[in-house]
Image: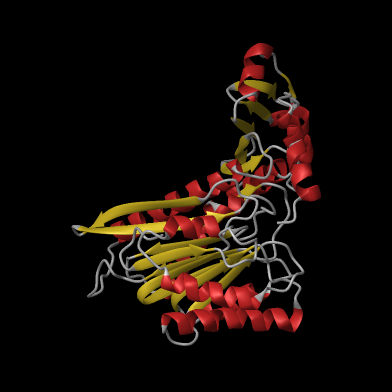
Amino acid sequence: MCAPAGFLASGVACGIKGESKLDLALVCSDTPAGVAGVFTTNEIKAAPVLLTAERAAAGVARAVIVNSGNANCMTGDQGVEDALAMAVAAEKALNIPEGQALVASTGPIGNYLPMDSVSRGIAQAAAELSSGGNSDAAKAIMTTDTYPKELAVEMELDGITVRMGAMAKGSGMIHPNLATMISVITTDMPVPPDALQSYLKRACEWSFNRISVDGDESTNDTVLMLANGAAFPEGHQMTQAQEDLFFRSLCWLTGNLAMSLVKDGEGSSKLLRIVVNGARDDIEATAVARAIGNSNLVKCAFYGSMPNWGRVAAAAGSAGVPLDPSKMDIFLGEHRVASLGQPSEYDSHALEMILKRDEVEITVELGIGKGSAYFLTSDLTTEYVEINAFEKS
């Protein structure tokens, strides 16, 4: 996140997850930044989601404070007060205007935040801000993640280097519905808030909204993007070609982060890439791909490296999209296992080797149109059950 000019970050242990575990991240821009946000569509929204959505709509922010270990969700009026108190504490510690600190939380639902500890942590995080604090920040937002997820990209516009940086967390409760995790994205490109919101929403649709680990949509999903314009202090109007480059770079960033979330899905051993071609349109292709990706039977089969393509066909048929099985082909890797709705001959040993890889592609050719889509998911393992039966965070 600190790759773009004018951004600082930090990550500290404030005591939510124990004395030594990083659990509070702060990101700050030297100057006011345009802001865009995409949030969960779950009807049960955590207090920080409601507060930050309202503040982000104003289009300007300077800081984002994120805690892990506690979702501050289903906490009533106290939770609303605590989310606001976090924002106010960050504004005072950073000496920035009221309303310009955004808040996100992640962790177990139904617990009150230890606000004395959180307030001390915010003061400490503000004091420790640095251009090298991004890695601690990325670690501080983790819950059941096994490693931090951060990435940066740079491009050249009119001879000036422009950068984007990002961190993300997410391992369980990952299900596509506009955000599906927590991510903070920074850029030193000057972008008006309305345009930034459009870029972010479309990029999320092609990345964070095309992944699933367990089909459970979180109450705290938040993606925020800050654009402070430090690369062009006098401002800059992008050409169409530059806008396209900027958007492609954002999609590359969010797409790779989305893939890392699935690879680190709770207990997962495989990344499953689902490709659907030949639908009537892209919307129907997406529905079919999503149905396959969210099928527990499909996910279990690939955990066991079983070529049970019938489960793929059944999941495709459950998408609510009219299909003609007599036109359907199914491929596992490069092996066609079903052709025109009937079994195909294939090399069982070669297919077994493919299914044991840590990345497997499932391709479904529907044969009824030109629509296409992709979707990323993980397999469903016994370790996932263990984590969610006994893990508290």
Residue 324 in sight here: no
Toward the front, the furthest residue is: 19
- Quarter where residue 159 is shown: bottom left
Q: Position of residue 221 (x, y in %)?
A: 62, 63
Please give the name of the residue rendered at 53% of the width and 51% of the height, measured from the top-left corner.
207
Query: From the image, which quarter does the C terminus lie in?
Result: bottom right
What is the count of numbered marks? 0
- Quarter where residue 216 is shown: bottom right
- Quarter where residue 266 is shown: top right
Q: Identify whether 199 is placed above or below 49.
A: above
Q: Position of residue 362 (x, y in %)?
A: 63, 32
Frontmost residue, 309 versus 139: 139
Q: Identify whether 302 is placed above or below 264.
A: above
Toward the bottom, the furthest residue is: 98
Please give the name of the residue rendered at 47% of the width and 57% of the height, measured from the top-left corner.
136
Residue 305 in sight here: yes
Q: In the figure, is residue 302 to the left or right of 127?
A: right
Toward the right, the furthest residue is: 389
Q: In the figure, is residue 243 to the left or right of 183?
A: left
Query: From the image, which quarter does the N terminus lie in?
Result: bottom left
Frontmost residue, 170 versus 325: 170
Q: Identify whether 334 is placed above or below 390.
A: above
Frontmost residue, 300 versus 201: 300
Q: Position of residue 192 (x, y in %)?
A: 38, 74
Frontmost residue, 183 versus 7: 7
Q: Specify how the rendered protein is coloured.
A: secondary structure
Q: Position of residue 293 (x, y in %)?
A: 68, 42
